[in-house]
Amino acid sequence: MFSWPAYPFIRYTFWFALGIVCYAYRLIPDAYLLTLLVISGLMSFLFLLAKGVFQRTIPTFLLGTSVFSFLFFSGGFLLQSRIASHSPSYLGKVSDVQGYLVRVSSQLIEKDNSFKLEGEMLEVFHAGEWEKERGNIMLYLAKSDSMPRYGDVLMIKGSPQPLSPPKNPGEFDYKRFLGYNYIYFQYYADTASWRFVSYSPASSLMASAIRWRRYFVEVLREALPDAHSFAIASALTVGVKDTLDQELTNAYAAAGAMHVLAVSGLHVGIIYSLFLLFSGGLVKHKKGRWVFAPLAILFLWVYAFITGLSPSVLRAVTMFSLIIVAQTLQRNSNIFNTLAVSAFVLLCYDPFLVMSVGFQLSYLAVIGIVYLQPRIYPLLFVRNNFLDKIWVISCVSIAAQIATFPLGLLYFHQFPTYFLFSNLVVIPAAYIILCVGLALLAFHAVPFLGAVLAWLLQGCIFLLNTFVVWVEQLPYSQIREVFWHTWQTWAIYALILSLILCFETRRRRWLWLGLCITLGFATSRIYYLWHNKQQEFFQIYHTARFFAADWVRPHTAFFTADEAFRKNAQAVLFHVRPTRLTHHIGNILISEESETSEWRLELPYGTLFYCKSASFLRLNRLPTTDWQKEVWVDYLILGKKSLYRLEQLPSNLHFKKLIIDATHSPYRAALLKEEAQRKNIPCHSLYDDGYLRIDLR
């Protein structure tokens, strides 16, 4: 029989996390948050005092409501305090900051032409004097002979730029993502705009961890000459994914094996199992567990140190540490309560973790494995020991996938069809690679042994990569381009929960609830498909330095763009794909690659588009001679090299609306828009106003 009193921290953590989420989405007003917190806190204190000291009977409903309200508002207040403590006190209030001092607060990520890193603001230079400052900034520093490191204090010339919201529909919200990490500004500095000032790390422990991690990466680089082997080894053992190429990453995603490349709960679990294998005998003795627990926790935190104390590993190690403590104390608690305690502790440390995809997937996977795996395993009895091990791994994969696939489809829009088959190889291979990789890091300096371990590690990774690529190439290895809304994800989880309750309680009402949810979900999907079929529009995307547009019709998009943008798969994925996903567009026709295009006509000075009832003329250059006839179009799109002033336009060119595309510089776009406003010309600037969608229905 299920009893809530046995799971107190599940309820505490739920209401605490809900308060954080509600405040993050501005559902709790700032002005009343502290008042509500104090009132709910006083009510909780008085009710508990009356019940515990004066032995008065307090209705459970009143006591629970007051306590949970206090936890709810505590979560919101904690997030409010953290945001206030990280928000800049000076930047944003002035526009003429000439320079600033920043301390590197993250590990360096090397890009093609720059170094990407997070910085902690220290001071800003304004009006001839330095002012103390706080807050974080995302920096992109042009490559030079000197490479910044964690703890370096840099002087940067220029003014930090506020982060911009997404300019295309459905586009990844980079501003919100960085905001969840308390980063509100970004800046690109060329080699002449920044210089080293001093070395002053905020945390000596973090500086040491990053230094050791960098050392181990160089050990792997020297031991593994093959680029793919080095990339997988560094990602799987120490959590460095900078060297993974997109093709290999896509192969692992298609095979359902991406979780092995992100050092997290799986890897910490392997480390814990290794320690348990060699010292598990201590647990069997009554006093031995008091020796085992601190050693196991120390072992896990040493591994976290090796990985540079990355957030995902810190989450997993904290979770395992609390589980070990609970088991050692032999408290009458269950694993779900312990997981809730670990989540509560982590959210107190960083409230925005609840918005992290890694945090959500990690806890859902663990909950799914802990709850569902013991219930799936008895469904099939296997006598053979080897086959039984295969069944155990399969049960773990099925349980984790049931718990995480709705969230995975929401965020990544794809599902690995052969995850069950691939994990039978990938999980044991990850175990072997991690063990051999750690052995190589420990004994790389030992003659012969280091070479043998390097050869063995490279061979294992080669076999794993070969298998993963083979799985990717199998027919229907992925279900792609899946889109649903957040509320539909919640509906799927409600369906899973109702089915679980149906099997647990044997009550048909949960089955009826599941059927109702299924009917509602199916109805919503049918409606969205019907609604998208009715839509037809022309959309010009905001893409820096390039022109790109889609003529969207039912299930089809006619795509036109500059050649450099079309060939940049990542740019198309980032800017254009979200619109196609939301409208269930599966057929993409690229007009520039088609021999005939009825809707697109190339002219000496630009391109003319005919999209049903609307016409668009994009000028790439000014005509060298006057036009002989009057030209009428609905929309005039100005390209980068078309003109510098609107007065240069031919007098016999007539249009209803002016569009300034994103190929212009921000300065030139602002001048053109200002001139259009003076002339009372309807104008849309992609730089200022974002994408433009013209309905053609």
Image: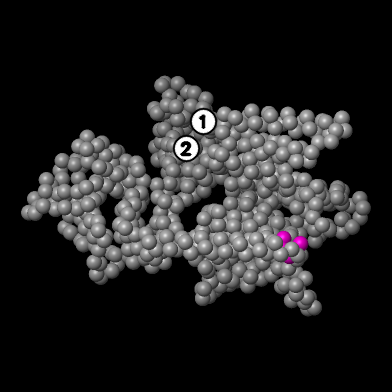
- Whether residue 557 is in magenta: the answer is no
Question: Can residue 279 be seen?
Answer: yes
Q: Residue at x 29, y 44 (%)?
A: 684
Q: Residues within 10 Å of mark 2 (few under 14, many from 20)?
A: many
Q: Nearer the viewer, residue 418 or 491?
A: 491
The location of residue 181, given as percent across then percent down, is 56, 41
Q: Residues within 10 Å of mark 1 (few under 14, many from 20)?
A: many
Read off the magenta span. Answer: 500-505
Image mark for residue 88: 1
Taking the view exactly as shown, the residue that stands out farthest to the left is: 628
Task: Inspect the image, locate mark 2, and give the three-letter code of the amino acid beneath it.
Answer: Phe
- Whether residue 502 is in magenta: the answer is yes
Residue under numbered circle 2: 185
State the scheme by which the image is colored.
one colour
Quadrant position of residue 224: bottom right
The location of residue 591, given as percent across then percent down, is 29, 64
Residue 598 in the figure: left or right of residue 195: left
The location of residue 411, given as percent across then percent down, is 53, 56
| Dominant SS type (magenta) | helix
Which image quadrant: the N terminus?
Answer: bottom right
Determine whether label 1 and label 2 are within 8 Å by CB: yes
Q: Nearer the viewer, residue 697 or 343?
A: 697
Residue 273 in the figure: left or right of residue 254: right
